[in-house]
Amino acid sequence: MGNGLDNVRRIYLEGIAGGNAREAVMKYTGHRYTQHSTGVGDGAEGFLTFFEPFVERNPKRDIEIVRILEDGRWVFCNAYQSLNDGAAQWVTMDMFYTDADGLILEHWDTIAPYVAATASGEDMVRGATEVDSAADTQASKDLVLEYTKQVLQEGNHGKLGDFIAPDLIQRAPNIAAGRVGLEAWLTSDDAGSYEMMFQLIGQGDLVVTYGKRHARSKDIAVFDLYRVADALIVEHWMNEEEIGPRETWGNSGKF
């Protein structure tokens, strides 16, 4: 476990869940803090302008980091948030870039409502939580890269069997179970087109992609998290957020 992973965990649990936003952002960010969560401005002051009122509005903050992984200077975090005794429930996927000392320099995220009744019947945040460090990270990343290129971007749905297990555990809230459910969704208007993969990171059996889809006349920022076993994708989580108009951004945008 590196300093970057520790600092991501701390800024979440101390700064947001613990309500010590000012102390945390000063301790765990580096010489810059470039922000891609579009409601938040750049730098420590942008973070504080958003999160100090957030803490006041939400005195009860139950935040659970469900899974976390690192790939060099990159850290990925998947969290569940229940605010004010469940009045609001959110799922977040966050990606961070850190400096050589593990201090946070840049942040990307998607924030989506927690959906209890999913199309597959699987909980959208549960499932495997720990990285299998014995798994071949590069092989896992290579598999997901080729799946993203050949199936999502090029639309070769006939190749799904090369990448996806028949009994895929599907945790995306709007996709039905198994390989069959995934294929049905990929050919629907809701899936649209996968236009860009911005980043791919992984550790052991877990691999994350962050990219952009276009569906139903909307641009969508999307994290896909995959678990790989026996050279196939066996579990899938997805968290997405519609990209609003440029005038609503508090920074340079989602990418």
Image (spheres, helix red, strand yellow):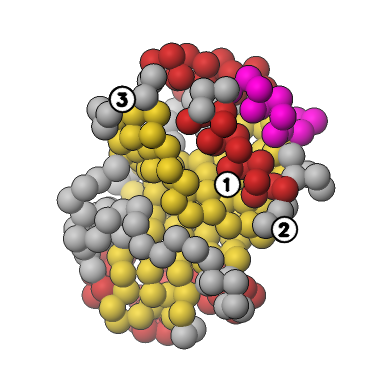
Q: Which residues are magenta?
A: 21-32
Provide residue 131's location: percent of width, then percent of height.
53, 66
Circle number at residue 84 = 3
Q: Is residue 35 above or below residue 229?
A: above
**Three-letter code, disc 2:** Gly
Find disc 1 in the rendering and name its residue.
95
Q: Choose between 107 and 30: the one closer to the eye.
A: 30
- Inter-mark Cα distance, 2 to 3: 36 Å
Q: Choose between 108 and 203: the one closer to the eye.
A: 203
**Three-letter code, disc 1:** Met
**Secondary element type, mark 1:** strand
- Indicate which label's residue lies in the foreground, 3 or 1: 3
Instruction: Indicate yes or no whether the magenta region holds residue 23.
Output: yes
Provide residue 59's location: percent of width, then percent of height.
39, 19
Q: Choose between 87 and 35: the one closer to the eye.
A: 87
Q: Is residue 171 above or below residue 230?
A: above
- Inter-mark Cα distance, 2 to 1: 12 Å
Q: Earlier in the sequence, mark 2 or mark 1?
A: 2
**Three-letter code, disc 3:** Asn
Horizontal side, residue 219 vs residue 200: left or right: left
The reply to whether callout 2 and callout 1 are in contact (CB within 8 Å) is: no
